Image (cartoon, grey):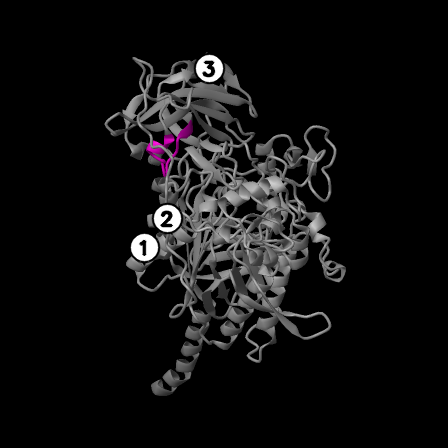
Amino acid sequence: MGRSVRMIWLPILLLLLLESGMASDYLIGLGSYDITGPAADVNMMGYANTDQMTSGVHFRLRARAFIVAEPHGKRVLFVNLDACMASQLVTIKVFERLKARYGDLYTEKNVAISGIHTHSGPGGYLQYIVYIVTSLGFVRQSFDALVDGIEQTIILAHDNIRSGSVYVNKGELLDAGINRSPSAYLNNPAAERNKYKYDVDKEMTLLKFVDNEWGPVGSFNWFATHGTSMGRTNSLISGDNKGAAARFMEDWFDQNNGGNTSSDEFEPNRIPRRVSNIIRIANDNHHELLELAASFESLPGKSTTRFLSLSRRVRSVLRQADRPKFVSAFCQTNCGDVSPNVLGAFCIDTGVPCDFNHSTCGGKNELCYGRGPGYPDEFESNRIIGQRQFKKAVELFSAASEKLNGKIDYIHTYVDFSNLEVTIPKEGGGTTTVKTCPAAMGFAFAAGTTDGPGAFDFKQGDDQGNAFWRLVRNVLKTPTKEQADCQQPKPILLDTGEMKQPYDWAPSILPVQILRIGQMVILSVPGEFTTMAGRRLRDAVKKVLTSGSSKEFGSNVHIVIAGLTNTYSQYVTTYEEYQMQRYEGASTLYGPHTLSAYIQAFQKLATALVTGKPVEPGPQPPDLLDKQISLLTPVVMDATPIGTKFGTVSADVPKNATFKRGGNVTVAFWSACPRNDLMTEGTFALVEILRGKDTWEPAYDDDDLCLRFIWSRPSKLSAQSHATIQWIVPQTAAAGVYRIRHFGASKNLLGTIKHFTGTSSAFVVA
């Protein structure tokens, strides 16, 4: 009898165990770490504006990563950077560290490192000359901040791996991007354009990560819009609209304590922020608050340790609960011709729309600027575009119900794009073979875009060039006839692919990669695909994946392009857009057939992914670290006026001051160069609120968009400097007594670094 019962229950138990295993399809892990970099003296990457030097922090930059693994099989790792783009050199050095730490668990094959394309982050971290000219060469501090931060992010994600599930959802976001080169888009075939409702991609694709024990622990989404809400004159480090959206969503989730995340609980017109550390004062009598504030006057700056900056940070890891930290990333996709300046481009002298074909005003490109929704306030435009992405992400996150199931897989190869034979369809039927070219940039590259116009007399849509700039170009390198013919109709301004002194000016060997998580497929591309170029690539890959005999992929396969991933090689337009030679076409390095080359490469990868056949690794890209040149001068020393300590207030709040919500609180301190200590995972600026009679609680820091840390020196060679901290009091701020605090690090003539802090007088928010 007992034996019979055991025999009956055995298959039932096995079935339950199998179902239990299937319910936990994957292992998931997420992590996030500070990559802010040097907040002084370093040229920003993106606009190529030599005058745009970092001088403070709008809000901090972060690396965010997810790992998805089969319990006993393959895994993929995706890292999203609040940086302009990925860098080949950064990628190489990260893999060296991962090899030393994890062996072959994480390699170039199954790891993707992608940039959000903010144009307000420190530059100097790429290895090819054309991308570091404006930063005076290589900037080791920028580079190290990225490599260190990516490594720490991956360590956190790896250490957080637990059983969980991944869900996918999609939806349209209509008001966060417009086409900034519509004349080029219109050159695509009408039949192709008619297949689509819009001239930019409006779809956001979101992954929701759910821990089996803790519930939701993160989300990553892909949506196309440029990181150019902050303009070419901004000097505060910023993650732009995607970095802002990530901050909003992480704060929103924390504010809900990981609890009810239904859209009913979401207030669409309010930006969330961390409020768990804000203690409201029970007695809000204004007179009593003023008396209490009057007892806290600013004091001379004092010495401290770096630990204090870390521990006082609002989102300090030292005060996090035991549950996994929620991580939300807003990733970049085919944003090549997509601008967040959704009001359109206008002439700053007349206010009329810019020329449609050339984006000029009276023939001058430098007068044509795109306008964001908060025009003329770029900070407000950035907030609005970030909020719109955040709102859509919350909606998709809350409604996500399609679970990813199936294999984890990946495939990767390197391709030399400088002289690649490509087979393309021929008019009238059949095929023909064409070639790509060594990298070159056209005249319209120097014209810039409506997001950030260039200088001199360059203009977009220039397929001729001019004699004067050809003479200037020829001083550097005269293109061969073969190269000029290959790049037609692009008039070559910089023949970067054939410029090798003192080392390579542009890349030729590029990584292409596919990551698979069940029915989700990520195409890692090392550049900025335009809207139609991205559509063609996705369609080509989908056709390969769904037409095979294996039937492994159905029509519900989700394909996203991860732009600016693993390295950077500028733009990719369609053949037809290339003919127009606007900025994007002039920046399509490898000639008119660049997109066809990518499609061919990804078709091969997709075929190999379906068939399970390996691909050749391809030629290795160079490691040019030892050849890098840096002309950025180091910090020699810091100084204050005689008798004044670092951290002492130089401009305080008014005596007995009361500020309303929406008001601007400004305090200045005698400070030192932020390059002395990047305050990684710490803060330069802090708003504290008084609890009780003598306990100060952190309320806002330099990772909050309402608090700006602005660094300046009276002259370029001065050893003295100021830190100005501006707090735009949020509408959600609690009434009470507050003060502003500054953290910094000074360097003496012997090179010794000493940390300091200072506080303002207290004031009232009512």
- Residue 165: image x %, image y %? 48, 62
Q: Spatial distance from mark 1 to mark 3, Cα to Cα?
A: 54 Å
The dot on residue 147 is 2
At x 38%, y 70%, the residue is 72
At x 29%, y 13%, the residue is 643
Q: What residue type is labelled 3?
A: Leu
Residue wearing tag 3: 290
Look at the image and give the residue range highlighted in magenta.
674-687
Q: Nearer the viewer, residue 461 or 399?
A: 461
Residue wearing tag 1: 97
Q: Which one is closest to the eye, mark 3 or mark 2?
A: 2
Left or right: 276, with 646 as reference point? right
Q: Does the magenta stretch include residue 680?
A: yes
- Label 2: element kind: helix
Mark 1 and 3 residues: CB-CB less than 8 Å, in contact? no
Q: Which of 455 and 169 is in front in this view?
A: 455
Q: In which quarter of the image is residue 304?
A: top left
Q: Spatial distance from mark 3 to mark 2, Cα to Cα?
A: 48 Å
Mark 2 and 1 residues: CB-CB less than 8 Å, in contact? yes
Asked whether residue 386 appears in the rendered view, the answer is no
Q: What residue type is labelled 1?
A: Arg
Q: Which one is closest to the eye, mark 1 or mark 3?
A: 1
- Residue 585: image x %, image y %? 62, 51
- Residue 739: image x %, image y %? 42, 22
Q: Quadrant of residue 171?
A: bottom right
